[in-house]
Amino acid sequence: MGRETKFIAICASLFILASLSNATAQRPNPTPRARPSPVPRNFQAGAVYVLTNQVDNTVAVFRRTADGMLTPAGEFPTGGAGDPVPQGTDPATDPLASQGALILDRGHQFLFAVNAGSNQISVLEISNTGLDLVGVFDSGGVRPISLALHENLLYVLNEGGTPNATGFTVGTDGTLTPLAGSTQPLIGDTAADPAQVSFNPDGTLLVVTEKAGNRIDTYTIDENGLPSAPIDNASNGMTPFGFAFSNPGFLVVSEAFGGTPSASAASSYSAGDDGVLSVISGSVPNSQTASCWVVITNNGHLAFVSNTGSGTISSYDLTSNDGTLSLINSVAGDTGANSAPIDMALNVSSHFLYVLAGGLQSVISFRVEHDGSLTLIDTDGGLPLGAQGIAAK
């Protein structure tokens, strides 16, 4: 696979085709079911962060008011280089083809960002005036696209060259120290086309999705933070992309099905102590196109999936104690025609959902309602073409 091919995510490369196929179709929009467990309410102010992914890479900061509105608050350099799309490229292009390019630590003290163009990870400290650069660190591979953090353990997914997952320890000042013996390959090797790396809630399992091979790689993590060799798990559906864990540790994975119109789905899994995944709910359809990113509310009861080809957000129910996944609403939120939602983040209370719309070069803000529906708050533009990675607090 050539470098230019890898620049374009499956979600984005099929965006134009999907848009044409769906232009005259009616979007299924089932009546939302009542939610037995509402999303907790917390009306404190916060912030939203977006990785611009430009040659001179920066993080764009938006101040968030208590009602979810955003105000631009400047851009802060990462000290590294992003991997932007060429000028003239379709705005829907998804240059990193990943989830987790920009993440927050649990205490909201540090931001961690990938610099895919310079093979580096940046750490930025959050301050009252914006972001202060702590340092820039080699990623241990080529073209880092996704990050995972558990306590003081950080892993990066390097997509280029021979793909790998590599670990670091995080100091109290945010500095990264390479973890000797932590680098592990992916099952699919150079043909993997990975999308995301993340930990399970207790940090004992590391997970990587492989889009090209329809695989989910897992690695058990020992007491020293070191991973096992990769464990090969077949994805229940085609093109596994983004994923998230619920509080009990159930895994929800989006399935883009190669961008086939109206064919997307999501599956839920449980994970054994040996790292083997077991399907709970297999490929629950949402009748949308190119489902790619997943977030789960902090009470573990609601999952949202962004559908790049449809310009929509689907909602799923996770209230069952056994990890059963069921569709609430195929179109819980609508980001608009040609908006190409390519990444999402919930604020700390899960009261607000922020969607990075690549087609609009904007952040679209929604309020999360008790029934799992989404109410549009506002749209904030001004982002550069190729921005990717979003985090919120």
Image: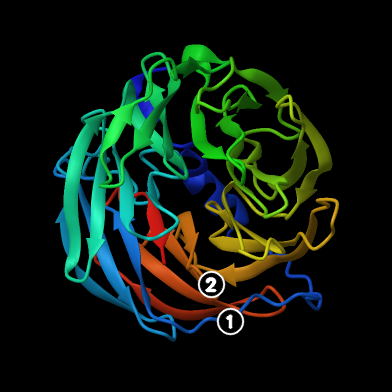
Answer left or right for 66 relative to 367.
left
Position in image of residue 49 (x %, y %): 32, 61
Marks 1/2: CA–CA distance: 7 Å
Answer left or right for 392 relative to 33.
left
Where disc 1 sits, the SS reads loop
Dot 1 surroundings within 10 Å: few (below 14), some, or many (20 or more)? few
Residues at badges 1 and 2 in contact (C-beta under 8 Å)? yes
Residue that badge 1 annotates: 41
Sequence-earlier tag: 1 or 2: 1
Q: Nearer the viewer, residue 176 or 86?
A: 176
Q: Quadrant of the C terminus?
A: bottom left
Q: Quadrant of the N terminus?
A: top left
Q: Is residue 358 visible?
A: no
The quadrant in which residue 67 appears is: bottom left
Q: Is residue 135 visible?
A: yes
Q: Amino acid at mark 1?
A: Arg
Q: Can you say whether 340 is above or below 241 in the image?
A: below
Q: Amino acid at mark 2?
A: Ser
Q: Nearer the viewer, residue 120 or 366?
A: 120
Residue that badge 2 annotates: 349
The quadrant in which residue 96 appears is: top left
Q: Residue at x 41, y 85 (%)?
A: 66
